[in-house]
Amino acid sequence: MPDATDNAVLTELGRRLVGGSLSDAALQRATEATGDFAILPWVNVVKIGGQSIMDRGRSAVMPVVDEIVANLPRHKMILATGAGTRARHVYSLAIDLGLPIGVLTVLGTAVAWQNAQLLQYLLARHGIAFIEPEGFASLPHYLMERGAVICQGMPPYKLWEENPELGRIPPQRTDTGCFLIAEVFGARKMIYVKDEEGLYTADPKKDPAATHVARISVRDLLARDLHDLVVERAVLELMLNARHIREIQFVNGLKPGQLSAALDGEPVGTIIYNDAAPTRAAA
Amino acid sequence: MNDVSRGAQHVVSRLMRESLMDKALIAGTEAPVRAILPGLNVIQIGGMSIMDRGRAAVLPLLEEIVQNQEWHTQVIGVGPGVRARHILSVGLDLGLPTGALATLAAKSAAQNAYMVSCLLASHGFVYLEAPFIVQLLPAMLAAARGAVFNGIPPYDLWEHPPALGKIPPHGSDAGSYLVAEVFGARSLILVKDVDGLYTADPKTSPQAEFIPEIRAADLLSLGLATLPLEPAVLHLLLRAKLAKSLRIVNGLTPGTLTRALAGEPVGTLIRVD
């Protein structure tokens, strides 16, 4: 075979990439300085919680649907769903049966998919389509034509999900999947619609002394090493490495107007932000 | 089942109503894992190290795989090689994010996997895309006599931005490892163009020493500048439930893969403990 690395049309970085080891830290550092093109800078990723919204049925879901419809003329949205109580059931069953993490991810994805279908039936009359991960290349078209699309929130890792540090629950679920959608498209906002105002010092459903946190840096939040969190830990860890998404917002979907306020840029609920320069800048 | 006090309709389970982010709850789910396909051997063929060399390297290796078919169930992951490096270069130059780069690079590995499956087709190997690995691998192994898959995991747009730079951290070594882990495979063999692990790059440092066996944690603490496998795999190994070791062998040396499949100590064994 001829040497494929001798190519005068490559950039200097390109020559290093073609010839070197991708695990070489010096080469990885050289890719730091490349630009960041935002693919869909006007899109908002909105995650509709599974247990917090969808499992409540009509009383919680319909007002959220109405609010989404009201925002269609002003904001373009990727609407993604969480899993919820059926995922918890199937996770317990699968753990009991000794099945591995990748299988649990496949099972959990089916639940988020069901919730996405439910949401899509309710929004179908507004021309909103459901797309699978494989169909994401068509997403810009749907967003331009109809202002929103629906997808399920799980990342498409399937059997390739990584083991968590502890326990048997897939560590990268729908919060993580939605965050990564926002990051890869360079989205305008990442908004999580749950059934609380956002972050508390403890679970407000269990501890009446819990106090609300309006704004907190991701580093502070990680440093607190809380026993429970409003969001998957993987999201906080990925925020530290993200190049586009500098903040994520949590709103209460049971309070009419909170989602709209967040879409309009108001500081409702809780904002977790990353203000520190990425560690890479020092490299 | 309808929890009136909270308004949510729950299915009764041990995890019902609980926060899945709660550390105590997560710890309480620790339990043994069953191996789904304990007889499986996952063999990862390197992209740049083997595929890009063409027939001189690829055909003898595939011949060896065929010779082992009677004794070992083999599923073959394949890496992307130099075309992925090229599209990474173009994509980085355009400012594309890591998830877009991962999607692009995965196609180069798919090409290599498809070529390997064509070369093994007459021996009953099938090429399976990720959704078919999920649904059909056990049936295919029962009916067919082996399978070939894209080594790069199907993370696509959902690939993690790495701590340093923009290169997708999960390549074909990580993807093949995860296949071995989820099925509880008998072995994972990474076929490269070096004998295994050295204290330095043997291609540039003549004083590099060979390491026949090492724990993943010790290897990480050595902090070697370059490794013959993706560092992500070492981190995955530390959390292994089932796939607690892997072997790196030289696919350019005839007989090495056969010896590795037979459980002989060739190449470098990297293990959890």
Image: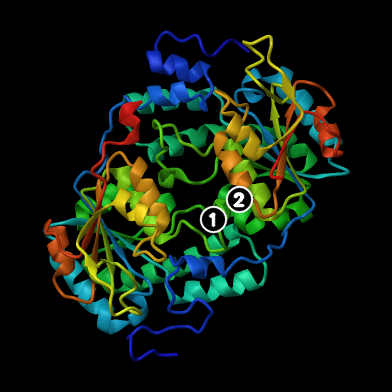
Question: Considering the image in quadrants, where does the N terminus of chain A appear?
Answer: top right
Q: Nearer the viewer, residue B162 or B100?
A: B162
The residue singled out by tag 1 in the image is A164
Judge left or right: residue B93 versus residue B220.
left
Give the chain letter at badge 1. Answer: A
| Disc 2 and disc 1 on one polypeptide chain | no
Judge left or right: residue B34 versus residue A137.
right
Residue A172 in the image: state x and y as whole percent: 46, 56
Q: Nearer the viewer, residue B219 or A75?
A: B219
Query: Dot 1 lies on which element?
Result: loop
Residue A225 in the image: state x and y as whole percent: 39, 57
Q: Is residue B208 visible?
A: yes
What's the CA distance linking mark 2 and mark 1? 7 Å
> In the rendered image of this protein, does residue A84 appear above or below residue B155?
below
Q: Decide: few, some or many residues near mark 1? Use Cα within 10 Å; few <14, some 14-19, many ≥20.
A: some
The residue singled out by tag 2 in the image is B239
Which residue type carries mark 1? Pro
Residue B105 in the image: state x and y as whole percent: 48, 33
Residue A96 in the image: state x and y as whole percent: 64, 73
Q: Nearer the viewer, residue B117 or A78?
A: A78
Judge left or right: residue A267 versus residue B112.
left
Question: Considering the image in quadrants, where does the C terminus of chain A appear?
Answer: top left
On the image, which quarter does residue B21 sit in?
bottom left
Which residue type carries mark 2? Arg
Q: Is residue B151 visible?
A: no
Q: Decide: few, some or many residues near mark 2? Use Cα within 10 Å; few <14, some 14-19, many ≥20.
A: some
> In the rendered image of this protein, does residue A250 appear above or below residue A255?
above
